[in-house]
Image (tube, rainbow, N blue to C red):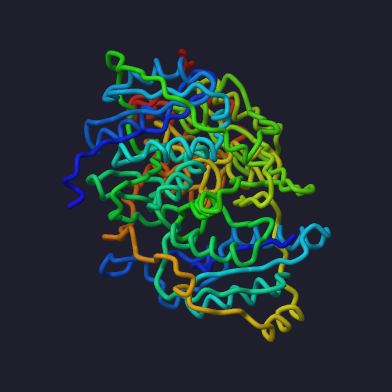
Amino acid sequence: MKVLVAVKRVIDYNVRVRVSEDHAGVDLAHAKMAMNPFCEIALEEAVRLKEQGIASEVVAVTIGPKAAQEQLRSAMALGADRALHLEHDEALESLHVAGLLAGVVEEEQPGLVLLGKQSIDSDNNQTAQMLAAMLGCGQATYASDIRVAGESVTVTCEIDGGLRILALQLPAVISVDLRLNEPRFARLPDIMKAKKRPIESRAAQSLGVDLAPRVRTLRVDYPAERQPGVRVDSVDELVDRLKNEAGVI
Amino acid sequence: MSSEQTVRTLVVAEQSSGEPDAATARVVAAAAALGEAIEVLVVGSGAERAAEQVARLAGVQRVHCCEAAHYDHAAAENTAALVAGMAGEYTHLLAAASTTGRSIMPRVAALCNVAQLSEVVAVQGPDTFVRPIYAGSVLATVQSDDALRVLTIRPTAFDAVGAQEAAPVAALAAGEDTGLSRLVDEQLVSGERPELSSARVVVSGGRGLGSGDNFRLIEAVADRLGAGIGASRAAVDAGYVPNDMQVGQTGKMVAPELYIAVGISGSIQHLAGMKDSRVIVAINHDEEAPIFQVADYGLVADLFEILPELVEKLPRHES
């Protein structure tokens, strides 16, 4: 079974984002970029499925500018067998990304598609569900455990108030959550080897998907800051203020 | 221009065993900010009973009720197909940004070939919305050019609507069972405590508690206040408490009237999940802890000494 994993180049999760001066967007110039942490978890799971002899091939795909090939190199260093790059310079919406991935699925015919539950920049949490809809296949979101057996996959999903375990027929699309696994670090020899490996790159437009924007960002702002609070010296003072000042108890 | 088209909104409600989810009244409030034409869809086993309650939410004009078991357990494939089939009648489709809404609505949007907007926190017009990005460090004001807008609504950003005389409830014929996924098991944490995301008061513990056993101190405070109990990711990762208690960017987003953070340092990811609470109290022995920067009331103290005293001095919650 082939496993397809989508990875996204995003701002590093440790970087504090800054609103651009004209409020048109977030200032990404010179910001450190990295693979989206949830995509790393999806990739790690795919590699583990291969190590268990369940997956025969792990294909990593990214959509983005030329620089996104850096994340594909990381993916190969971490265990992806092949890397596909759909080059596109402008930011795309989840609907476009899902449409392009559906095109890749048509060509590659994977048994399983693994994605991060969301990217930490746009925080949409949509692509896996949209892709599953376009492919007409089953979906599982927020996966914290994935077990493939024959023609089906059993997925533990983290839901509000607990866990839900679903069985899906393959092929299926799964979005993964933080607790699924702890991604490994790439070894230096693997990083060096990955530098020499080929990346299959082509223009995203070549897939014939309508990439016209549907949503425009009018402006971005920092959220309102909380007013500075006060230090209290004792439980008595705290209880008094909560009762008589804040009126919440 | 699209903003002049007549708004007609369908809210996809959640219910469990005939009890509508508390977030529904908040999503209806978001719908009311769009326009007066508000209808609600309730699906699954128990939908008929839930529909009776939903019909009494102020502003709801009609409830569509589809009592069929293949919509139970948030069956995303079946529910999305049903909603997409109804979409032609509406300009806006809304659901709560819960794990259920977030699973179903993108699927609906893709079936309708339109964009979806996630976690909307403010409605500025029929096509203009505000939503957090970058884990809430930034708010984006976005305009959707699609004729059909599919939104998930962050419930804590809207005040629940009140009550009204019951609106009419209409039975809706069930769609097909796609059979694409099957429920194997569901493990829900049940209890007397209010659900974290809808609790009026939340008491959360962090790494500073030192062990799962010590969460009894948090429970005692929560009992006194009738509060929900949360935890930081550090406490969850340390194995003190199960992960459904986690408050933060990667857990639950909460915005209660009162949030008490005990032994929590206040990582960015935790703050993203609770900084919209009305009043925040921080109790921590480390006066440099970042949590104090967002706290309305900060108490630098040893939590093991303070919590028993707090339990003693808090007024008893009357349910």
Q: Is residue A248 above or below residue A95?
A: above
In this image, B158 relative to A15: left or right? left
The answer to whether A195 appears left or right of A102 in the picture is right
Where in the figure is residue A52, as x and y percent of width and height?
83, 58
**In the depicted view, which residue is nearer to us: B211 or A223?**
A223
Residue lying farthest to the bottom in this orientation: A196
Residue at (56% x, 75% y) in the render: A85
- In this view, which residue lies farthest toward the right? A53
Q: State whether residue B248 is above or below residue B192.
A: below
Say if residue B111 shows up in the picture. yes
User: Residue A123, image x and y in percent?
Assistant: 46, 54
The N terminus of chain A - image quarter: bottom right
Decide: is A100 above or below A246: below
Residue displayed at 68% across by 37% down: A165
* Figure check: B186 above or below A171: above
Quadrant where the C terminus of chain A is found in the figure: top left
| Residue B278 placement (x, y as % from top left) | 37, 36
Give the residue drawn at x 60%, y 51%.
A175
Q: Is residue A237 visible?
A: no
- How many numbered marks are there? 0
Q: At which x and y percent is residue A65?
A: 47, 77
Answer with left or right where residue A235 lies relative to residue A214: right
Q: Nearer the viewer, residue B189 or A134?
A: A134
- Compare residues A75 and B45 and report the one nearer the observer: B45
